[in-house]
Image: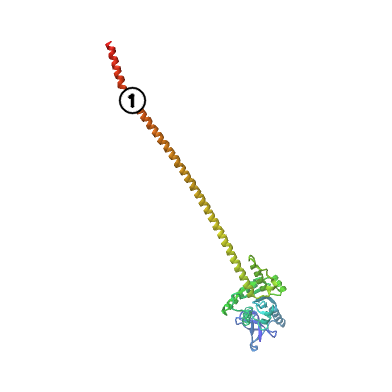
Amino acid sequence: MKGIVIEINNNQAAVLSDNGAVVRIKNKNYETGQVVRMKENKMNFIKKAGSIAAVLAVTAAGSFAYALPATYVSLDVNPSIEYTVNTFGRVLSVKAVNDDGEVITTELDVKNVNISKAVKVTIDKLREGGYITDDEDAGIVITISGKNDEKAEELVEKLEEETKEYVEEIGETAEVEVEAVGKERVEEARSLGVTPGKLNLVQKLVKSTEGVEGAEEIDMEEWLDKSVKEINKAIKENRKQLKETSKAVEKADEEDAEEANTADEDKIEDETEETKVKNNKGNEKNKVNNIKNNKNDDIEDVEDEETEEAEAEENEDESKAAPSNKTNNSSNNKKEKNN
């Protein structure tokens, strides 16, 4: 007989059996919501709950809590699948969201299975069907939505870690993306007949075309029918082209800057050369002036020499004339005495 653990109290666990009875069994590190197998001869039916009404209340409460959907998990490769999960993390139901999903879900028995395990079982089925291959563009997109955002984020971390580990363990290279989405995104995706994960991925594709020269407009309806691998490939190509464009623009900017620097250097060199020419002209002019000044000095020196020579000759003439005058004066004095 199977049962669902609805409550744990130290060493005992209360289990809701598949016949509707609540029984108490020994707790073997069970988790709330876990499906367990029980032997009827070892089951301890709860008859001492105080009254029949109390037993029925426990049974009803446990059944209601277990059957109540708490979280919706979608998985996309190309098959798109959605799991309804209860508050205990157990799969209540699974449904296909597209035709390829129908192929997988018909062979998928994950009801009452922990969602982490259900995802791993689904991945195995996808591998068997050839949907997950050793391809650099292969991907698995998982989205989670629920009334409790905090629990949804906790499940994101749990599923991301465990799914990535499992994909690596089985030797696949598919990129795993797990994210939480709001109620509005879930409703929008359902109105389009797709999962929130596929809608998010195509919107990433649209965004990846921004700034890409010659990029074609994305037809949402067309791309929502494509596989995760095809969309991932297109996104990577757009990002690669955008990166190359950015590099080309950056290179052109560097070349422009280099040309500007070269022009500045040439201008400085021209100005320097012009200054040198001006300086040289100034120096030549100074040389000419110096030569002129030197010539003038030489002329003055010659004139001075000539003046000095003339004065010397004049002095010499005067000196020669002086004795003759002296003789004449002496003769005159003698004549005066004789008279």
Badge 1: how crowded within 10 Å, few (<14), some, or many (20+)? few
Helix, strand or loop at label 1? It is helix
- Residue 270 x %, y %: 51, 51
Total numbered circles? 1
- Residue 181 x %, y %: 67, 71
Which residue is more in the foreground, 106 or 218?
218
52 in relation to 333, above or below: below
- Residue 140 x %, y %: 62, 76
Q: Is residue 326 visible?
A: yes
178 in relation to 290, above or below: below
**Identity of the amino acid at label 1?**
Asp
Judging by the rendered image, the residue that carries numbered circle 1 is 317
Tell me which residue sits at (41%, 35%) in the image: 299
Which residue is more in the foreground, 63 or 212?
212
The quarter of the rendered structure image containing the C terminus is top left
Q: Is residue 158 visible?
A: no
